[in-house]
Amino acid sequence: MAKELALALLFDRYGSLLSTRQQELFDGYYNEDLSLSELAETYGISRQGALHTIQTAERKLKDTEQKLGLCRAFSDIRHMARQIEDLVRPLEADRPEAARIAALARRIAEE
């Protein structure tokens, strides 16, 4: 499941870099939970052809993340924003700017 979530995040970030067919098959397999047989029938290809297209898409998504690192960077930013929020939370009662900092950190972590 963690692998599927990681691939879904990569697809959300980089999916537009895939061909239309790769996008459709990847989305059908991972997001719509269609089997290889169902995909093969829908697209008029073999199960092996569907699997090959999905695997090619997976590799392209992983390679793109390896080169650009955007998902990793966004994850790191969210983590740091949560740490900032945790650090300033105890100060909020005494310092009004701490509440603003915490609110900004929350916004960053949520985006």
Image (cartoon, rainbow, N blue to C red):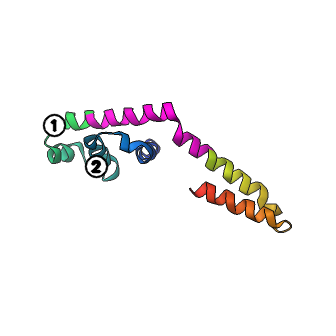
Magenta segment, prevailing SS (helix, strand or loop): helix
Q: Is residue 31 above or below residue 62?
A: below
- Residue 88 coordinates in the image, percent (x, y): 78, 58
Camera-nearest residue between 25 and 97? 97
Image point (57%, 45%), residue name:
74
- Residue 81 coordinates in the image, percent (x, y): 67, 52
Image point (37%, 40%), residue name:
17
Tag 2 secondary structure: helix
Residue numbers of the magenta segment: 53-76
Image point (16%, 37%), residue name:
46
- Residue 60 coordinates in the image, percent (x, y): 38, 33
Q: Crowding near pointer 2: few (<14 within 10 Å), some, many (20+)? A: some
Image point (74%, 64%), residue name:
100
Provide the residue designation for mark 1.
46
Provide the residue designation for mark 2.
28
Is residue 92 found left or right of 15 in the rendered image? Answer: right
Q: Tag 1: residue type?
A: Ser
Question: Cα distance, mark 1 to mark 2?
Answer: 15 Å
> Is the C-beta separation of discs 1 and 2 under 8 Å?
no
Q: Is residue 59 above or below residue 16?
A: above
- Residue 8 coordinates in the image, percent (x, y): 42, 47
